[in-house]
Image: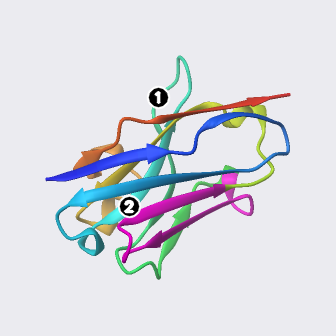
Amino acid sequence: QVQLVESGGGLVQAGDSLRLSCAASGQTFSNYAMGWFRQAPGKEREFVAAISGNGKTKDYVDSVKGRFTISRDNAKNTVYLQMDDLKPENTAVYYCAAAKYWSSRRYSTGYDYWGQGTQVTVSS
């Protein structure tokens, strides 16, 4: 079992930055690829970013490339999502998740464990 707890969400204005954190406990953190997903009201949960277990490989949805950065600190069992130049369309509940296999990183079904989510609201 892996327990995940997100933090760092909030209400910001367009153009501002936020850094989300996801603290993990349980099994060996570096054994898991970590992903961030988001779900806006009335929409399906969508992939945002993922990072491999050793932190060397990253993947982003096109809409956040150049603005969002995923990173991890395996010594602290924590994954981060730095979000810069936020836009109103980035408003959503953001979830972190842990996956055993990198190949399925873009699909929510590829993840074994999920956090409870943290709300990000961007006003215009």
Q: Residue at x 47, y 77 (%)?
A: 57
Of 104 and 75, nearer the camera is 75
**As drawn, which residue projects farthest toward the front?**
76
- The residue at which mark 1 appears reads as 44
Q: Residue at x 38, y 56 (%)?
A: 23
Q: Label 1 near label 2: C-beta < 8 Å?
A: no
Lower sequence index among marks 2 and 1: 2
Of 62 and 41, nearer the camera is 41
As for residue 122 lying within the magenta part, the answer is no
SS for dot 2 = strand
- The residue at which mark 2 appears reads as 34
As for residue 78 lying within the magenta part, the answer is yes
Residue 67 appears at what percent x and percent y? Answer: 74, 58
Q: Residue at x 44, y 78 (%)?
A: 55
Q: Which residues are magenta?
A: 64-82
Give the residue type that dot 1 points to: Glu
**As drawn, which residue projects farthest toward the left?**
1
Above-or-below relation of 58 to 108: below
Q: Is residue 5 left or right of residue 2?
A: right
Q: Residue at x 53, y 17 (%)?
A: 42
**As drawn, which residue projects farthest toward the top?**
42
Residue 70 appears at what percent x and percent y? Answer: 55, 64
Give the residue type that dot 2 points to: Met
Other residues around mark 1 within 10 Å, as few (<14) / some (14–19) / many (≥20)? few
Other residues around mark 2 within 10 Å, as few (<14) / some (14–19) / many (≥20)? many
Q: Is residue 120 left or right of residue 33?
A: right
Above-or-below relation of 63 to 89: below
SS for dot 1 = loop
Kindly report the distance in space between the C-alpha atoms of the residues bearing marks 2 and 1.
19 Å
Residue 113 appears at what percent x and percent y? Answer: 25, 48
